[in-house]
Amino acid sequence: MAENPIQTAANDSVVVRLVEMWGVSATLWWGLLALQCAMALIMPSQVHRSMSAFLASLALTLALATNGLAPVAIGLVVLVLTLLWLNEYRWPRHIGAVQAWGAGLLVGLLVLQGLAYANQFNWIYDSDALWLGPWLGPWLASWLGTALVALALVSVIHQAFCQHSQPAIAQRLAIYVAVALVAVVTVYVPGLGAGVAVLLLGFAIGHRPLMGSGVLLLLMAISSYYYWLDVTLLVKSLMLLAMGAFLLIIRWILKHWLLNRWLTVHKPAPLGDANEQ
């Protein structure tokens, strides 16, 4: 069977770009990022757009990793991914393109988290380019990345509030406190916030692949944390205990919130009216 020349050219261009990405100096990562973003916008093939979005996420991470800011890049990918899927139907003429970009960024997020857990970004560090020194720079990068993930979580929750009835002030405060707790735990368990954000995003828009990817990200985060040798088993046990208690509190809040909503919608008729009928 004859090969499709357009698809063959697309595959060849992908291979060429992959070779270029890993072979050029770090000063060209930003140029490669701009190139991949442009190709994601103009290429007619949805597969090529997804691949360009995936490569753009890699280029962004490698560009920031030279300054020790790889966590910031992962947080940006989570935030952009969340905003794309939340606004999937805002531009009806470009639904296919938005879905392609979102799929590429989702695959990129999974790959980037795997590389981060394997410490594959350490080789690209430029010690002379590290911001704020070798100690304060990584700490600040971790908090900035966590803040971006928390912003993605807040976006998902805000969208859920807009689609459904507004909860009480106390319930909203409890939910936002829960987001802050997730952010704090994510600093010590990298990837946890990204998994929670993608999982809630999948629930919010009814997207099964996103929910499955969120579960996978959570499993990767917990597994990486469990085998982290720099932390004692006692600290790990206390952190896992805190996460379990946090999940139980979230379950209790959601259960009572959903129960109150159901009782409001299905409010039974007064007994007096039933007797009169």
Image (cartoon, grey):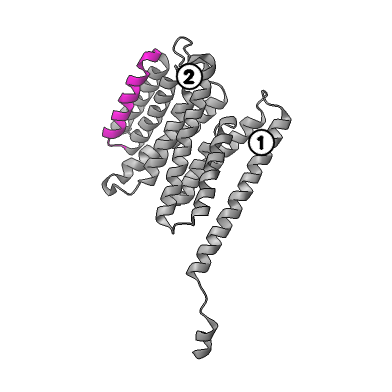
- Between the residue at mark 2 and the residue at mark 1, the CA separation in whole angstroms equals 26 Å
Q: Where is residue 122 in the image (x, y as percent from the top left)?
A: 52, 17
The disc labelled 1 sits on which kind of residue? Met
Name the residue rendered at 53%, 68% in the picture: 263
User: What label does residue 176 carry, if any?
Assistant: none
Asked if residue 243 lies in the magenta stretch, the reply is no
Q: How crowded is mark 2: few (under 14 residues within 10 Å), some or many (20 or more)?
A: many
Asked if residue 31 lies in the magenta stretch, the reply is yes
Q: Mark 2 points at which residue?
A: 68
Question: Which element is circle 1 on?
Answer: helix
180 to 173, vertically: above or below: above
Residue 151 location, quadrant: top left
Name the residue rendered at 51%, 49% in the picture: 173
Q: Is residue 121 visible?
A: no
205 to 10, vertically: above or below: below
Instruction: Read off the magenta span.
Output: 24-45
Q: Residues within 10 Å of mark 1 (few under 14, many from 20)?
A: some
Q: Where is residue 150 in the image (x, y as percent from the top left)?
A: 48, 38
Name the residue rendered at 42%, 36% in the picture: 79
Pick whichever, 203 or 193, lies toward us.
Answer: 193
Question: Which element is circle 2 on?
Answer: loop
Q: Name the residue under label 1.
A: 239
Residue 9 location, quadrant: top left
The disc labelled 2 sits on which kind of residue? Gly
> Does residue 90 appear left or right of residue 162 in this picture?
left
Q: Where is residue 59 in the image (x, y as percent from the top left)?
A: 40, 23
Q: Which badge, 2 or 1, comes first in the chain's sequence?
A: 2
> Does residue 46 appear left or right of residue 121 in this picture?
left
Name the residue rendered at 31%, 25% in the picture: 34
Which secondary structure type mostly characterizes the magenta part of the structure?
helix
Q: In which quarter of the image is the N terminus?
A: top left
